[in-house]
Image: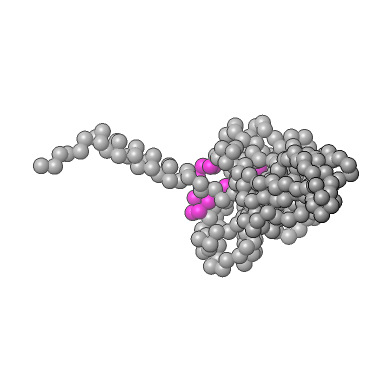
């Protein structure tokens, strides 16, 4: 004989279903990196800095601007009282655009799928908007802020075409596509940016600082070092190998070497990648039969 299910059993089953659904939606759903502006390897922007076009500030976010402006990281009065936000304030009136965008490695499985972009945004301009750019389809219709100066959660649904492309971007800022009327003092501020599969915006995925940093280091990393070595013959150079914390996106990256100490006028410099899988770099002295001695960092830029 089959025993009738008790009400408590149904209650437990419902709880299991809700828990399972929550876990399924919570796991690694956000295609945006550094959506709450936790990671800033390139600099400290807690004080206002000049905002210039085609420049990275917080990790993974690149500027696109024809307006003069300032950028600042803020850590108070964020929606939900968590995380950080970034604010860009214009300092001239112009017909242009002033935005921050993230360029995304578009996975093959996302072709022809529907995605939802969401973000908390604050602005005093109704020209502030979310947008998505696909190299095949161009820009989507922007979703705008009211310009009322309060935090608003903006959401947009976008369906990719059946054609793949390496150029896929999400954009936030003073832009309505093409030339946008900007008045000095217009600003936009945002945080908790998310891009996820489906047509519904779910709660923001909070990742730990360590995990977010590692994800960002696939594209950019600062490697600090202290090195000392000697070459013992006229045909030899002193050298060493530095390993990256995270393997880079590919082996074609830009290196910037900053050394803050050296001796005997020997400059430490980068000669070659160690391997094709972009796991490190090799340093050598600038001359044979010389000493290599210095400390500093290497900036490894492998952005899209």
The residue shown at (58%, 59%) is: 106
Q: Is residue 11 left or right of residue 104?
A: left
Residue 73: x, y in percent?
A: 71, 37
Residue 79: x, y in percent?
A: 60, 36
Would residue 36 be seen by someone viewing this image from the given angle? Answer: yes
Foreground pick, 96 / 298? 298
Foreground pick, 100 / 199? 100
Residue 251: x, y in percent?
A: 66, 57
The residue shown at (63%, 44%) is: 245
Foreground pick, 125 / 32? 32
Foreground pick, 228 / 187? 228
The span shown in magenta is: 190-205
The colour mode here is one colour
Q: Is residue 142 left or right of residue 8?
A: right
Residue 114 drawn above or below residue 72: below
- Residue 194: in magenta span: yes
Q: Quadrant of residue 265?
A: top right
Residue at far left of view: 1
């Amino acid at each position: 004989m089959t025993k009738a299910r008790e009400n408590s059993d149904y209650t437990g089953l419902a709880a299991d279903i809700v828990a399972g659904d929550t876990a399924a939606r919570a796991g690694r759903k956000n295609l945006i990196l550094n959506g709450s502006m936790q990671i800033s390897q390139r600099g400290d922007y807690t004080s206002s800095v000049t905002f210039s076009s085609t420049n990275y500030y917080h990790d993974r976010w690149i500027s696109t601007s024809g307006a003069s402006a300032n950028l600042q990281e803020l850590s108070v009065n964020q929606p939900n009282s968590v995380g950080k936000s970034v604010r860009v304030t214009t300092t001239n009136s112009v017909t242009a655009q002033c935005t921050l965008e993230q360029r995304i490695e578009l996975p093959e499985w996302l072709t022809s799928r529907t995605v939802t972009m969401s973000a908390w945004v604050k602005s005093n301009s109704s020209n502030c908007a979310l947008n998505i750019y696909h190299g095949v389809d161009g820009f989507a219709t922007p979703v705008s802020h009211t310009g009322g100066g309060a935090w608003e959660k903006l959401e947009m649904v976008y369906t990719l075409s059946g054609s793949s492309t390496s150029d896929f971007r999400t954009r936030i800022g003073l832009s309505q596509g093409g030339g946008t009327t900007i008045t000095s003092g217009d600003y936009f501020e945002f945080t908790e940016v998310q891009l996820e599969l489906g047509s519904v915006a779910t709660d923001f995925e909070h990742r730990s600082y360590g995990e977010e940093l590692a994800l960002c280091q696939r594209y950019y990393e600062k490697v600090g070092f202290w090195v000392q070595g000697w070459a013992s013959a006229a045909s030899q150079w002193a050298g060493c190998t530095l390993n990256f914390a995270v393997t880079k996106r590919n082996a074609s990256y830009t290196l910037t070497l900053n050394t803050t100490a050296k001796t005997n006028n020997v400059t430490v410099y980068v000669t070659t990648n160690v391997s094709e899988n972009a796991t490190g770099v090799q340093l050598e002295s600038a001359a044979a039969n010389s000493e290599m001695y210095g400390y500093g960092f290497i900036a490894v830029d492998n952005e899209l």
